[in-house]
Amino acid sequence: MLGHLLRQSGARRLVALVLCPWALATAAQAQATTKPPGGIYTCIDDKGRRLTADRPIAECTDREQQVLNRDGSLRTVLPPTLTAEERAQREARDRSAAELRAAQVDAVRRDRNLMARYPNEVAHSRAREAALDTVRLAMKATEIRLRQLAAEAKPLRDEAEFYEGRSLPPALKSAIDANEVAVEAQRAASANQVAELDRINRLYDAELDRLRRLWAGVVPGSLGPLAANGAGGDRAARDTAAKP
């Protein structure tokens, strides 16, 4: 019986000796496949010392940290940890940069559209005259209306002379007042139309100066905003007219 037990014990030790290396190798392989290889963090702190660790370095949270592979090659760069105020400042800078990029894209698009709309000076001159003609027609209509109102006012004034020194009848006074209001409105419209002619000419002058430089080969989007007041008003110059 004792011999039998000794034989069994020896067999178990033999099995253990055989299986142990295999079990250890299997466990090591499993650990290697489930645990990603660690990086080496390195930085130079504010005292000029180079620090190295297997995790992010607390002394370097205010500066970049290099993350190296085991062979010393660069894996990535860990940016500084920002405070809330620093993050807000960075976001503001990012927004400002994005707005500048968008403005530049828009400037390029506007210049290209301008060149497509006006391939030469003749086309631009025709567009200017078309815009001016719209306002000129409105000015003529205003002049005609002012003459009509002047003609309507004469008999009213003549009738009012009959009541000199007395109160005017309500109907006559109302007609005179309405005529005067209409005249003032037409005079205001005439002043607006004169201003509109000037605005259109200034706009087309600025456009022509820009176009001449673009036609000469200046890069679209490099000229800044249109110089004339109402920049971007090429459509307004084409479509807007002061009404009588």
Image (cartoon, rainbow, N blue to C red):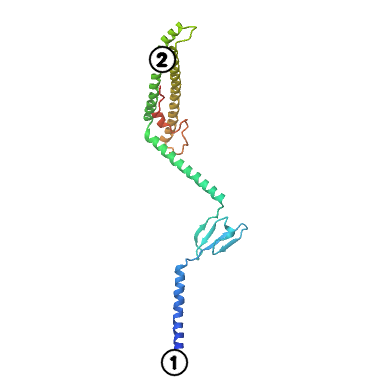
Image coords of residue 78 (percent x, y): 52, 57
Could one spot residue 219 in this view of the protein? no
Instruction: Tell me the element at label 1.
Output: helix
Image coords of residue 113 (percent x, y): 39, 36
The answer to whether 154 is drawn above or below residue 25 in the figure is above
Residue position marked by numbered label 1 in the rendering: 4
Q: CA distance from mark 1 to mark 2?
A: 137 Å
Please tell me the numbered disc located at residue 138: none
Residue 239 figure quarter: top left
Circle nearer the N terminus (1, 2) = 1
Left or right placement of residue 154 versus residue 45 in this view: left
Q: Quadrant of the C terminus?
A: top left
Residue name at image x 52 percent, y 61 percent:
67
Q: Nearer the viewer, residue 135 or 101?
A: 135
Count of all numbered marks drawn on residues in the image: 2
Q: Quadrant of the N terminus?
A: bottom left
Instruction: Tell me the element at label 2.
Output: helix
Amino acid identity at mark 2: Leu
Image coords of residue 152 (percent x, y): 40, 12
Please tell me the numbered disc located at residue 149: 2
Q: Nearer the viewer, residue 134 or 243?
A: 243
